[in-house]
Image: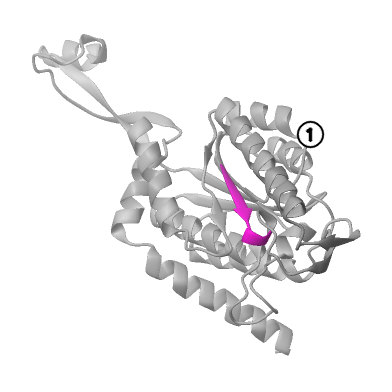
Amino acid sequence: MTGKIKDLMARVGKIRILTRRLVDDRLSGDYHSSFKGQGVEFDEVRPYVPGDDVRTIDWNVTAKTGVPYIKRFAEERELTVVFMIDVSGSQGFGSGGEKGENRRTKMEVAAEVSSLLALTAIRNQDKIGLVLFSDKVEKYIPPRKGQGAVLRLVREVLAAEDGAHGKTDIAAALKFLSSVQKRKAVVFIVSDFLDSGYERLLASASRHHDIIAIPVSDPAECELPDVGLVELEDPESGELMLVDTSDAAVRRQFAAASGAEASSLATLLRRNAIDSLEVSTDRPYISQVRALFKRRSRKK
């Protein structure tokens, strides 16, 4: 086994241990109550009691027995959960210093939070699938059950980090989703959303699927530190730019542009009734996951 593969498997194992520790009964229960099943299915018949909805009376059984019976239905629970994960060049960014033990890239955080959600889905007997995309669909794994599906998801996302390149094309990923996922699914879109022109397709997809957006950010993308002259590189285009971060006006302009992008995304998601789970490379995400489940449970 080469050193590169050993390193990858060690990182997969680390994320697996971390997320399995976070998936407790409470989180699993919150997940169960947060997402609706595909519909309802017949469960049983039982004798009618005053107060039951007369529309649920089973007239065939009632006619045979001479006693009124009603039909009971249960939620068809099994869900299909699809993770659409951005593996473009910008996802390989992390500002925590040189690449090493303490540095987390946006891709690593995407792998962690997706693993947590996937493990929770598997514990609830749901199926999980994966779409990796940049400016095109890089990989598709059809939905399936089992712990193996979770491990492969994490492995594929982390493996994609070494080859992270290209721009983000959310519209292309959404078009692909509509071609392969005909039945309603829960769809997590994990991306930094540094893209445009996908708004119409996102609105259309949200009418067919239950979509949750997971914007992944890094603090250095929101606010420039005062460190003098620095050369910045756009990870998706490769364009270089020399910036004087000691200039307060430059830092304010950068922060304002970042804030405007975040506000525009929030407005888009709100307009289409799409839930969001914001995560960052510099902070834990478990509290945000729990808060998302509780918000959805209350609405449901």
Q: Which residue is mark 1?
A: 197
> Is the residue 61 above or below the residue 1 in the image?
above
Three-letter residue code for mark 1: Gly
- Which x, y percent locates residue 222? 66, 53
- Which x, y percent locates residue 240? 90, 62
Front residue of this view, candidates 16 and 200: 200
77 falls in the magenta region: no
Q: Could you say whether the residue bearing mark 1 is in a helix, strand or loop?
A: loop
The structure residue drawn at horizontal position 68% and vertical position 39%, both measured from the top left corner, is 260
Residue 110 in sight in this render: yes
> Is the residue 3 above or below the residue 244 in the image?
below
Residue 272 in sight in this render: no
The quarter in which the C terminus is drawn is top left
Colouring rule applied to residues: one colour
Front residue of this view, candidates 252 and 81: 252
Front residue of this view, candidates 294 and 246: 246
- Which x, y percent locates residue 297? 35, 38
Q: Magenta span covers which residues? A: 213-220
The quarter in which the N terminus is drawn is bottom right
The structure residue drawn at horizontal position 48% and vertical position 55%, both measured from the top left corner, is 117
